[in-house]
Amino acid sequence: MEECNILVVDDEAVIRDGLQRILNRESFRVDTCKSGHAAIELLQQKEFGLIITDLKMPGMDGIEVLKAVKALQPNVPVIMITGYATVDTAVDAMKHGAADYIAKPFTPEQILDKVRRVLEQRTITIDEICLRKEIISHNGFHQFIGESREMQKVYHRIIHVAATNSTVLITGESGTGKELAARAIHENSPRKEKPFVAVDCSSLAETLLESELFGHVKGSFTGAVLTKTGLFKIADGGTLFLDEISNISLSTQAKLLRVLQERKITPIGGTQLVPIDIHLIAATNKELRLLVNEGLFREDLFFRLNIIPIELPPLRNRKQDIPILIRHFLKKYTVEIGKQIRGVAPDVMSFLENYSYPGNVRELENMIERAVVLAEGDIIRNEDLELWDRDDTSAHGGSELIPLNAEELKEMKRHIRDHAMETVESVFVRNALERNNWNVTRAAEETGILRPNFQSMMKKLGISAKDPH
Ligand SMILES: Nc1ncnc2c1ncn2[C@@H]1O[C@H](COP(=O)(O)OP(=O)(O)OP(=O)(O)O)[C@@H](O)[C@H]1O
Ligand SMILES: [Mg+2]
């Protein structure tokens, strides 16, 4: 066990001295205080790895000590000693962020067990993730997170092209932020009040794509019952983002080239040329040059698009950005999912820092989202990541992680939100039952709850005394 200063706060000398002896034997360094006020004074002078405090004390009680700890040394775990435990106080303690609680009387083994468990769970907290790396909390650019030189170059390019009207080709592997870059260009351009229209060229068949882009006049083909305004026209004055440009057919490529040369479109079935004013941004995760060599992409169009290239670097080539991304997504998903996650286990952190991320930032984001959803405690542990179907534990190659099923994820989030409170209660009730061999009467007595009330809690939580699982 790591070296650690423990602070014991209890008004009873027997408990203070007893705990000190037990913990000293295990070579922990121990300070003791006999009141909450004394503890707070000490907390302002000295750092602790763990605090054990009595709940019921004259003057300042354990909950107030807990609150002070959260304010002064927020990452330090607190174990609460409860005497006449009631569900309310124990639940209250957990709600205020106690790591665990132990009911009096307890044996040396019981308290050492709790201490070890809590210390093993010692976490690299969300805020420490980047402090450790001495990264100042400067937030990248626009929605981008990342401070690496590679990303700084991207930000500069974005600012530069946003001020021009030159066609931009954004390249980069899947999940590197190509769409984010396109939006950032628009947001930083004089066109930002006008529409940003994104078209996924891979999701539409050739004829559909053309009628989406150029529009059509009524009756121009079977099914064209109404006149349709094309996206080029809808984006007029703004930005048109053609995503996955490598997927368009050679004939659509020819039409696109004409538009870029003439800055005019003809709706399908129409005769009039309509002038358009757009900033065109295209993106691809393929090597367009290779497609040009294979005759699958027009060289003249490639040159037209590639006036200003922006290449988004894969995450594995800018590993220094990983911690700040982890912190960002942890914060984002703890808020979104409504779970209190303090941080990650050290082995999780080192895995995340060394993984190769074939799916880049999107993969990292999915991993964190899923881990936050699955985490059973308040830290992300190895198991929460290993539930992934992952065959790459090394730092090279491998396949992208299977993305979350959106429905399944939504369902889990809803469940977690609804049951966050019940989980605390459930742990409390189960522990009480376990300590009393699943004898309901004794468990109710021990927790100071009337038996019928205890039973109705069990019922609400779906806990049956006959089935201790
Ligand atoms: N540097 C970054 N900082 C924060 N979030 C990022 C960053 N890069 C990407 N993301 C996030 O990762 C996800 C994927 O980004 P985006 O859709 O822009 O990738 P892409 O390059 O277009 O991927 P694909 O080729 O698969 O379409 C998005 O949720 C985006 O917000
Ligand atoms: Mg994309």
Image: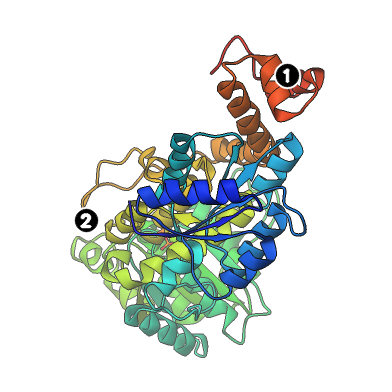
Residue name at image x 39 percent, y 83 percent: 152
Q: Marks 2 and 1: which is nearer the front?
A: 1
Q: Sequence-wise, which precedes: disc 2 or disc 1? A: 2
Quadrant in the rendering for residue 415: top right
Residue name at image x 42 percent, y 87 percent: 156
Residue name at image x 44 percent, y 42 percent: 112
Q: Is mark 2 on a helix, strand or loop?
A: loop
Indicate yes or no: mark 1 CB to ligand 1 under 8 Å. Answer: no
Picture quadrant of ligand 2: bottom left
Q: Position of residue 341 (x, y in %)?
A: 55, 53
Say if residue 271 shows up in the picture. Answer: no
Mark carried by residue 395: 2
Residue flagged by tag 1: what amino acid is it?
Lys
Residue highlighted by disc 1:
459
Q: Position of residue 129 (x, y in %)?
A: 43, 66
Mark carried by residue 120: none
